[in-house]
Amino acid sequence: MSATADAAGLARLLGGKSAAPVVGVPAVPHPLEARFAPGPQPTDARGVSRDFLRHVVDTTVLAVEDRPGDGDVLAFLPGAREVRVVAEQLRGRIAAEVLELHGQVGAREQDRAIAGRRAGDRPRVVVSTNLAESSVTVNGVSVVVDAGLSREPRRDAARGMSGLATVRCARSSADQRAGRAARQGPGVVWRCYDEPTYLALRPQVTPESQTADLTGALLTLAAWGTPRGESLRLPSPLPAASVQGDEAVLRSLGAVDDAGRATAAGRRLAEIPAAPRWARALV
C-alpha cells in the first residue's frame, strides 16, 4: 500500500459494520535529517513566482555542495514548466549533471533519470514533478529538495469547469517526498519553507472528487447504471452541491434525465474519450 494512503479510512470502507484489519509491516528506516530553508511567497497572481523558483535553485545548489557522501539530489517542483526553469538555471551554476523528470519527457530520458548513475559518472540532480513522489523510484538519491507545492484540480464555479491550481502539498506528500532521500541509506531533506508551514499542512491529499469538475464522472456513473454513485460505497462521498450543479450541465447536454439516468445520447457521449461538453460538440 502507498505510504500516503489513508489506511484507517480504507479499513472502514472495506470492513462494513466493523473496520477491516490493517496489517502493518514494520521496517527500520534509514536516518533522515530535515532542514528548513524558508524563502519568499511561493505563488503570485501568475502562478509560481520567479523569486521562489530562484530560491529553490539556491537551495538546491546548497544541497549539492553540502550533500553527505556521494548520493544524488532529487528536487520536487509542482509542474513541468517549473521543472524546466529550475533545471535550466541549475545547469549554469553547478558541475553536476541535471536531468528532468516529468510526463512531457520522453521514455528514454525518464529511464535515464530513474536508473541512477554509473561508476565514474558525475553527480546528478534530478528535477522532477510529483512523478517521482510515489510512481517511480529514482536510484542513488540521498538528498531531496522539496518546494512544498503540488498541482491539483480545482473546480472553477464561474465557468463550471476544472483547472489545475498550484497549492501547498499535503503533509503526507511532503513526508513521502522526504522519504525518497532515505530509501537506500541515510538522507537529508531540504524543505523550501519553514517548520510552522510544514506542521500546518493538511494531513492527507484532498480527494480529487471533492474539488474537481464531476461532469465526466457523473456521466460515467450514469452509463454504468449507478446515477450519482448512490449505490456505490465510495472512499469519499461526492459533494452534493457539485453533483447538483454538474448534473444540471449533463441535463442541458441531453446526457441524463431528471433522475440522473443516462439517456441514449448520454451513453454515446460516455463512449467518447473527451469531457462531456467536448464530446457533445463532436456528435
Image (spheres, rainbow, N blue to C red):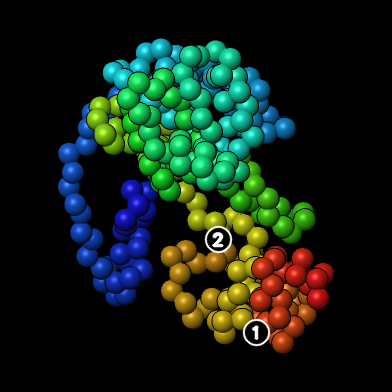
Q: Residue, x 24% and y 30% (percent of image)? A: 185
Q: Residue at x 56, y 37 (%)?
A: 78
- Which residue is pictured at 63% across the width and 19% down the height? 51
Specify few, some or many for label 1: CA neighbours under 10 Å numbering under 14, 14-19, or 20 or more: many
Is residue 228 positioned above or below 101 on the image?
A: below
Q: Which residue is mark 1?
A: 261
- The residue labelled by disc 2 is 209
- N-terminal of the two: label 1 or label 2? 2
The one of 15 and 221 positioned closer to us in this rendering: 221
Quadrant in which residue 161 is drawn: bottom right
Quarter that holds the C terminus: bottom right
Image location (x, y in percent) of residue 271: 66, 76
Quarter of the image with the N terminus is: bottom left
Q: Quadrant of residue 45?
A: top right
- Under mark 1, the amino acid is Arg
Q: Name the secondary structure under disc 2.
A: helix
Instruction: Give the percent coordinates (x, y) of residue 168.
Output: 53, 37
Distance from Cα at disc 1 to Cα at disc 2: 20 Å
* Near-viewer residue (279 or 122): 122
Task: Examine the rendered structure and indicate whether residue 250 appears above or below residue 77.
Answer: below
Please indicate, yes or no, whether residue 202 appears anywhere in the rendered image: yes
Look at label 2 and name its amino acid. Answer: Ser
Q: Position of residue 68 (x, y in %)?
A: 30, 17
Residue 91 relative to residue 25: left or right: right
Q: Is residue 47 left or right of residue 282?
A: left
Q: Is residue 34 visible?
A: no
